[in-house]
Amino acid sequence: MDTEAQQTERDRSSRPSGSEEISDTEGQEGRSRFALVSRITGWLPGGRISLTLLVCLLFLLFLNAFVVQPFQIPSGSMENGLRIGDRVLVNKLAYRFGAEPRRGDVVVFDGTGYFGDADYIKRVVGVGGDHVVCCDKEGRIEVNGRSVDESSFLYPGDSPSSVDFDVVVPDGTLFVLGDHRGESSDSRDHLGSPGGGMIPVTGVIGRADWIVWPTAHWTRLHRPDAYARVPAAAGADG
C-alpha cells in the first residue's frame, strides 16, 4: 500500500509545473471572448453576418477619414486627364508627416471662403514664395523665371491662360489651375477675392493618386516633369 501511494505521488509530481494553469487561463480567455461575441451577435439582428458587416463598415469609415477618400470629378475643368464622372482616390496621408504639396500635384481641397462652399480638384502651379506670371513671349506660364511646357497635360487647343497675371504666392498657400483652362474656375478667377485666389495648404484634403473608376480609365496619376526644372523661389531654403 505504501509503495503504491509513493508511486502515485511521484506520478503527480512528474507533470510539468504550471501547465494546467496556463491551459486553464487560455481556455478561460477563449471562453470569455466567445461569450462576448455570442452576446453581441445575439443582440444584433442578423447575428454574425451583421457583426461582420459592421466591422467592415467601421474599417471603411476609418480609411475614409484618415487614409484614402474617393472623390468624383464633377466638371470638365481637369480634362483630358480627369473626365466628368471619373472617381479618384485621394491620398490623405500624402501631406500629413511634414511633406507639402509640390508643383504639378493634383490636389483636392476645401474651397470654403476662397472658391466656394465645396471641394475642388486642381493642379498646383505655384507654392509658397513662387513668382507666377502669364505669359512669356511664347504664351507659356513662367514660375520663378522659368517657362513651363504644360503640353503633356493641358487640354488640347487650350492656351495656358487667356488672362494675364503676375503674382507672388504667399507662404503657406498654393496657386492652382485646372488642366482645361478654358473651362476651369481657378486661382486666376479669384485674384480679387478673399485670399487673392490662393488656397491655404491647411485646406488641402489630399493628393489625387489614382483613377479607379471607370475601370477603362484606371491609372496612377504621376507628377509631370514640366516643373522639374523650375528653380526654388528666391530666398527659399535649398
Image (cartoon, rainbow, N blue to C red):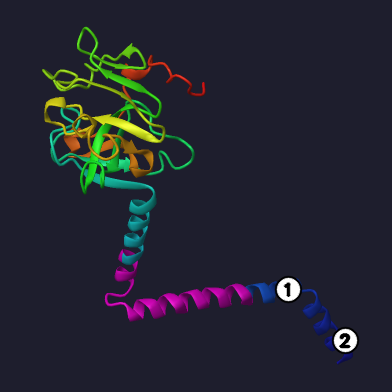
Task: State the image coordinates of residue 61 (x, y, percent, origin top left).
Answer: 33, 57
Q: Residue at x 38, y 16 (%)?
A: 230
Mark 2 crowdedness (10 Å alpha carbons): few <14, some 14-19, many ≥20 = few
Read off the residue under disc 2.
3
Is there CB contact under 8 Å for labels 2 and 1?
A: no
Note whether 140 is above or below 69 in the view shown: above
Q: Residue at x 13, y 20 (%)?
A: 158
Q: Farthest right residue? A: 2
* Magenta range: 24-53
Cα separation, mark 2 vs mark 1, equals 27 Å
Residue 33 included in the magenta stretch of the image: yes
Residue 152 has which mark? none
Mark 1 crowdedness (10 Å alpha carbons): few <14, some 14-19, many ≥20 = few
Note whether 175 is above or below 90 in the view shown: above
Residue type, mark 1 in image: Gly
Quarter where residue 48 is shown: bottom left
Residue type, mark 2 in image: Thr
- Whether residue 220 is visible here, answered yes or no, is no
Quarter where residue 26 is shown: bottom right
Read off the residue under disc 1.
18
Residue 122 included in the magenta stretch of the image: no
